Image (spheres, grey):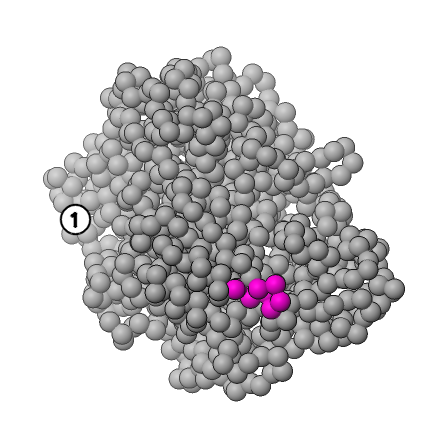
Amino acid sequence: MFRQARWIEPLLNELTKEEGVLEKVKLEGLPDEIVRDKLDIPNLTETRVVRHFMRLSQMNFGVDFGTYPLGSCTMKYNPKVCERIVSNYKLKMLHPLQPQETCQGILQILYELAQCLVEITGAHKACLVPSAGAHGEFVGALMIRAAIKDRGELDTRREMIIPDSAHGTNPASAAMAGFRIVKVPSNNEGLVDTEALKSVVGKRTAGIMLTVPNTLGLFEKKIIEIVNIVKEVGGYTYYDGANLNALMGKVRPGDMGFDIIHLNLHKTFATPHGGGGPGSGPVCASENVEEYLPVPLIEFDGRKYYLEYDRPKSIGFVRGFHGNISVLVKAYVYIRLLGSMGLKSASERAVVNSNYLLSLLDKEFYEVPYSTSMPRKHEFVVSVGKALREKGVSAKDIAKALIDYGVHAPTIYFPLIVQEALMIEPTETESFEEVEEYARILNEIAYRAYHDPEWIKSTPHNTSVGRIDEAKASHPRTMRLNWRNLEKV
Amino acid sequence: MGEFFKNYSREKLEKVLEKIGVKDVEELYSDVPDEIKIKGELNLPKALNEMEIEKYVGKVLEKNMVHDEVLTFLGAGLPPHYVPAAIESIISRSEFYTAYTPYQPEISQGILQALFEYQSMICELTAMDVANSSMYDWATGAAEALRMALRVKGKKKVLIGENIGPDRKNVIKTYLEPLECDILEVNYDGVCGRIDLGDLEKKVKDACALYIENPNFFGIIEKDAAKMADIIHKEGGVFIVGVDPISLGLLKPPGEYGADIVVGEGQNLGGWLNFGGPSLGIFACRWDMSLVRQMPGRIIGMTTDLSGERRAFTMVLQTREQHIRREQATSNICTNEALMAVAAAAYLALLGSKGLRKLAIEIFERAHYACRRLSEVKNVIVPHFSGEFYQEFTLKLVGEDINRVFDRMIERKIIPGLILTKYFPKLDNVLLSCFTEVHSVENIEKLVEAFKEVMV
């Protein structure tokens, strides 16, 4: 039985009535008029601050507490040894601008990581700088822009092709890089419609951004043809690595013909997601576009490791300093712990778990869109549209019921091409027993949806708060975005 | 040492595969064309067990030289700070760090409230009204702020200070390149090191934004910032200010001198240096819906549950974001730096207004002490710029080549600062040094002694 803590924990500023008036200060070399005189941050004891955040932590849920099958987010277990390794003082106190002879240790680790990522993706070179998946996508789109500009075709090639099943970040990233988005529809198998693709490519095509396996969990079996269609018209191919967890050691994006690939280390390579970051989104490139990668890259001249900035065709700098370094180190440790066999087994088990979970579900209730005969990869999508039509029970209701059982909900309402979608990715780190239990819960919810739909609609009851009033949260008249404007509006 | 996934008996695995309806695992990959399937194995270094990898990485990291072995006076956007132990206890709670973005708010109230408090304290610190729950870092925050100004104003020209951090400048150029707009630099005054107001007046026409940093890259306080706000506002533009958050324990916040958007590096607040990341981009703006609706990133709001009785938190204004608005979104940002924002919230809460004031004063005094002591060294002109400074200042070396001096300092196990020539070619033989609470008086004396030996 799951019961989340229900602390009534005030906001920090409610823990004391004292005003944040600052002491007057007179310092030589500091004119009075630029000294601040008021700062309303409460003054509390360390005891109270620690209690505050510990209580808050008890009202949060992570993968350490239960199954967390958020589709396309790859919420696998985060090995604890990674945390201990990055708590090394020799890393924590290292300044990014130190002379490189004083940073040889970290540069070596990062160099070795880049080599591993190049091998895993089948690319030519990796840049570890981008801080998240979407950051990597933006980098990739900028590289395509730079390559096209180099060819003198930027005036004409302004279209980025993106399937209708893509993550929202793809069109957003391409738009940020100045591209127009051309949507290519999925066919009745849930895959890219190659005929439709042929009809939209041409002289205006800058490239295609593709997630493989796609967000339905399906592998694009015509991947070679798709890549060729785009390359034949002079476009570039971008692989969104959000779903690479299905394919490690099985097939590589580079071998499929992709020019640019981003990875989500906080998904595939087991670094913790931190409740929304820090993540890391390295970008790997094939030989024909590697010169456009952002700087710095990490190189080795046989004697010493160094940061390489002298790359005239690079798109330049995409963040301050060299990346989310401790995240990169954790991913390195993960890769070394598993090795080539381990990574392959991880992907295979992720795919087995996903198909096993799907096989256990009540398909009357959880309808499988698109081809039912094709194996899913690491994730799958089902629709509860029928329950909505017949009983008024929505995907959101199912999600809230699930969390009442002490497991996390899947991704819902995505991909957009499936009505009332549940996108489920159990990952390899759930045992068969846990997969079976998740299936049992989903099937029980399906049963209750028909026998006690009002209960489902009233969930959750066991979490620290009941269902959120979202309308109040975003309405201009009741919106509260910080503790200062609580009374203001 | 555990396994992350279980090795089942052949029997159990076969049962599972049978239930799925395939004869073996390979059949689940039957849709992958044979010609691209990996034959054999990836060529990766041999797998190590937990004990071995911990030893290995520990040994390699030994090669790094950090603060105690090599005395470091580098700041340049990332000044070193002490991280209180309580911060690590808080962010190593796996309820926080093993969670995803709070898509199911009812089961994620902890991190949502912590992020709401982070936003609130950033608003207090900067004197702004709305903060988001983080950007990747300062540089990307500054770049996104300028993109936001360009969207809001629909013009094609922005101004940035010549004396902002070079990495911010570089990232701004990369991020704005696709917008095909003009980025003009406003010169700094060669004597005081502050923005040249005359040059700003000259260049402001048709600009939709001005981005400056305070203190600027040379460590100098831009005490005319209010005048800059007037100049850019008269042109109808947005005033964007980049800050070091800890300096705001002492210095007037940007909201009190006319800033519309404030960005900054929050890694300083409870995060270790970590060779530059994880970082934390601070991003806040005024209460103006035309700005707020164009903000990038996640914003947490306070509401109640449907009973109306329990206070609750959730992500708000999501219609700005990529998962709903797709190519019309204000930014593509999705994963951000949430855990670092929790660390920053814990840090600010631990210090409180009094602790922050005390820390900022300590830093100010330490830097000024160092400046006085270094001014006694022959052939070191310090500070090179005359403007009032906070924690960093510039030193001009006379008669000795700076690279030679630097090498001889390294021999003495001291990194005296950052040589600026590479970033600002007209600053010949100039060094930027940073002093914070981690530098003891003994450390400073050691630096002074070394300069005395080297600058003969």
Please state the horizontal and vertical placement of residue A160, each as a whole percent of the image: 35, 30
In this view, the residue farthest toward the left is: A390
- The C terminus of chain B: image quadrant: bottom right
Q: Nearer the viewer, residue A120 or B188?
A: B188
- Locate residue A271, reporting x and y percent: 53, 45
Residue in the foreground of this view, choosing between A457 and B192: B192
Crowding near the residue tagged with mark 1, few <14, some 14–19, many ≥20 C-alpha atoms within 10 Å: few
- Toward the viewer: B203 or A51? B203
Q: Is residue A10 visible?
A: yes
Of residues A168 and B45, the one nearer the viewer is A168
* Residue ID for mark 1: A452
Q: Is residue B376 above or below residue A82?
A: below
Whether the magenta-drawn stretch holds residue B193 is answered as: yes
Q: Name the quarter where the N terminus of chain B is drawn.
A: top right
Magenta part, dominant SS = loop
- Relative image position of residue B323 (x, y in whole percent): 32, 44
Which residue type does callout 1 highlight?
Asp
Residue at 31% over, 59% down: B291
Question: From what the image shows, is residue B84 above or below residue A390?
Answer: below
Residue at 61% x, 41% y is A296
In this picture, residue B7 sits left or right of residue A60: right
Label 1 element class: loop
Residue A172 is drawn in which quadrant? top left
| Residue A459 counted in the magenta span | no
Q: Could you tell me which residue is drawn at 65 percent across and 77 percent down?
A: B365
Q: Residue at x 23, y 43 (%)?
A: A395
Residue B301 % position (x, y) = 31, 62
User: In the rendered image, is residue B248 in sight?
Assistant: no
Q: Is residue A219 left or right of residue A300?
A: left
Q: Which residues are magenta?
A: B189-196
